[in-house]
Image: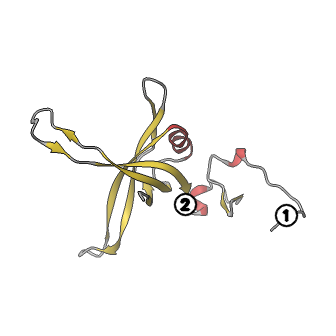
Amino acid sequence: MNKVILMGRLTADPELKQTPNGTASCRFTVAINRKYKNAQGGYDADFINCTAWRQTAEFICRYFKKGNMIMAEATLRNNNYQDKNHPDVTHYTMDVLVENVEFTGSKSENSSESKVQAFGGNPVPSGLEEHFEEIFSDDSPF
């Protein structure tokens, strides 16, 4: 099984790009604090480069911005290639290909106003409010 789950903050606004045949993509970096303090008493961070394609890329670029918390479900892919200047040298890299993302920020981070709206039990992230409407009913199965 090849499954990676990352949760951290975006280091920059994601930017939507198109391949020559019109396929949407975006690259972004997630900063993830390490669990343990370093010798200076602070936390080091890892900066993980990620790539998303198609609808996932469009969703990320539309609803996430620099500093937002994001949870990304992904897979790892090898990307080995020969050095153009030194044909006998092979470079080995791992790419994080994002398949799904989730909002993970706090209420205050995701809401520009003090108004709280439900989004699967969580506040609706800023920019999504106009896509949802509150439903009042006594017929709830919960």
Residue 22 location, x and y as percent?
49, 26
Q: Kindly state the secondary structure of the residue where label 2 is placed.
A: loop
Single out the residue that lies furthest toward the top. Answer: 20
Query: What residue does disc 2 label?
Result: 104
Residue 99 location, x and y as percent?
49, 48
Q: Is residue 69 left or right of residue 31?
A: right
Query: What residue does disc 1 label?
Result: 140
Quadrant of res 110? bottom right
Q: Is residue 134 left or right of residue 116?
A: right
Residue that appears at 29% across and 44% down: 79
Colouring mode (rainbow / by chain / secondary structure / one colour): secondary structure
User: Residue 15, relative to residue 43: is it above or below?
Assistant: above
Residue 9 location, x and y as percent?
44, 56
Question: Crowdedness of circle 1 by 10 Å Cα count: few (<14), some, many (20+)?
Answer: few
Question: Crowdedness of circle 2 by 10 Å Cα count: few (<14), some, many (20+)?
Answer: some
Quadrant of res 52? top left
Q: Kindly state the secondary structure of the residue where label 1 is placed.
A: loop
Q: Nearer the viewer, residue 40 or 18?
A: 18
Residue that appears at 57% across and 63% down: 106
**N-terminal-most mark, 2 or 1:** 2
